[in-house]
Image: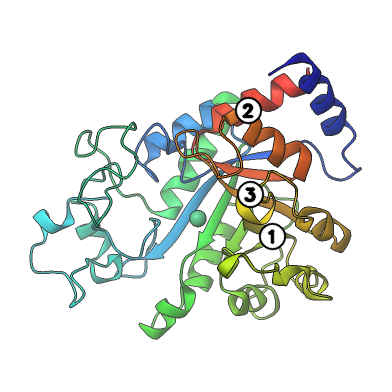
Amino acid sequence: MPVRHAILVAVTLLSAPAGRGAPLVIAHRGASGYLPEHTLEAKAVAHAQAADFVEQDVVLSRDDVPVVLHDLYLDAVSDVAEVYPGRSRDDGRFYALDFTLAELRRLRLSERLDPRTGRQLHPGRFPAGTGRFQIVTLAEELEFLAGLDRSTGRRTGVYPEIKRPAWHRDAGRDISPIVLRVLREHGFATKADACFLQCFDADEVRRLRHDLGWEGRLVQLVGEVADGGPDPLLATGALDDLAAIADGLGVPLARVVDPAGRPTGLVDAAHRAGLVVHAYTFRRDRLPAFATDADTALRLVFVAAGVDGLFSDFPDVCVDWLRTARR
Ligand code: CA
């Protein structure tokens, strides 16, 4: 980055208010820019690239084992249609919940395909259909990351997301208590532990805190604002209500920086309410609309908007950028 920018960035990052340290780099589905998402290989690279946190999306298998997968269905990231022909539902999709863990273990994971075209979603990435990658359980991944922490002497946090709890409930399953049990068994239970638990479902976030007794850090995920209207989170009281339950907010990049490259004000408002803000998702090969290069994108997100964390498919790019900025 240009020297002038580097100095400005360093000053801004170093002058972050007490209690909020340098921004966190969260490996989005692992280092998914380099290896198929949610494989242990992608998690190992994320750890080696010094991501502060590594993300796990979690769904249930037929036998109620929490497994690390982004979608409820398997067809965009595995060879399920070849291995289990005829096991799709009426919508043509193959759901993880319809397969036991033993059955899921027979699948090969692959770089994500675009279901509309059947082609690789991110063309420049790891070649789809190659490699031998497997679905892992949440417990296996937590054990794997703990092993890397021990062998490298560097602590990397975990960032599990409970996927579609209401959908699971409609199917007769209660995913949240199962995920909490696995987290607690692996030492994640309080706000002092290196874990953020995240969910889009606001009712479930409340339930996790009030009914299920989750005492660890909790992040409310939110989606895009429809039609580019005003951000409902900026309505009076909205962020304060959230802060009564959650520790942080997970928001799309477009809600922290507007198309003209100006901070939207959401991060500052969230900070005033006592919430941290983690934005998603930085992709070097699919930059946000407000930037034409990675350096500009990261400067706007980390410095101008002042987020506390960034989900990234390319953890190394963000880690390197922050290191350069701090020098
Ligand atoms: Ca996620």
Relative to 58, does residue 44 appear above or below in the rendering? above
Whether residue 288 is visible to the viewer of this picture, yes or no, is yes
**Residue 137, x across and y down, in percent:** 38, 54
The CA distance from mark 1 to mark 3 is 21 Å
Q: Residue at x 77, y 20 (%)?
A: 6
Residue nearest the observer in this picture, 54 or 105 = 54
Whether residue 189 is visible to the viewer of this picture, yes or no, is no
Relative to 110, does residue 292 appear above or below in the rendering? above
Q: Specify whether 29 is left or right of 238.
A: left
The CA distance from mark 1 to mark 2 is 24 Å
**Residue 242, x across and y down, in percent:** 75, 71
Q: Which mark is residue 39?
A: none
Q: What is the three-letter code of the residue carrying label 3?
A: Pro
Choose top left, top right, bottom left or bottom right for residue 104.
bottom left
Q: Specify whether 9 is left or right of 286.
A: right
Q: Residue at x 63, y 36 (%)?
A: 297
- For the residue with label 3, is its CB less than 8 Å from the closest atom of ligand 1? no
Q: Which residue, given by chain and number where applicable, does mark 1 sit on? A: 249
Mark 2 crowd level (few <14, some 14–19, many ≥20, 10 Å Cα): some
Closer mark to the observer between disc 1 and disc 2: 2
Q: Which mark is residue 295?
A: 2
**Regarding mark 3 in the picture, which secondary structure is present there?**
loop
Cβ–Cβ under 8 Å for marks 3 and 2: no
Closer mark to the observer between disc 1 and disc 3: 3
Q: Earlier in the sequence, mark 1 or mark 3?
A: 1
Q: What is the three-letter code of the residue carrying label 2?
A: Asp
Q: Which mark is residue 259?
A: 3
- For the residue with label 2, is its CB less than 8 Å from the closest atom of ligand 1? no
Q: Residue at x 61, y 31 (%)?
A: 318
Q: What is the three-letter code of the residue carrying label 1?
A: Leu
**Regarding mark 2 in the picture, which secondary structure is present there?**
helix
Snapshot colouring: rainbow
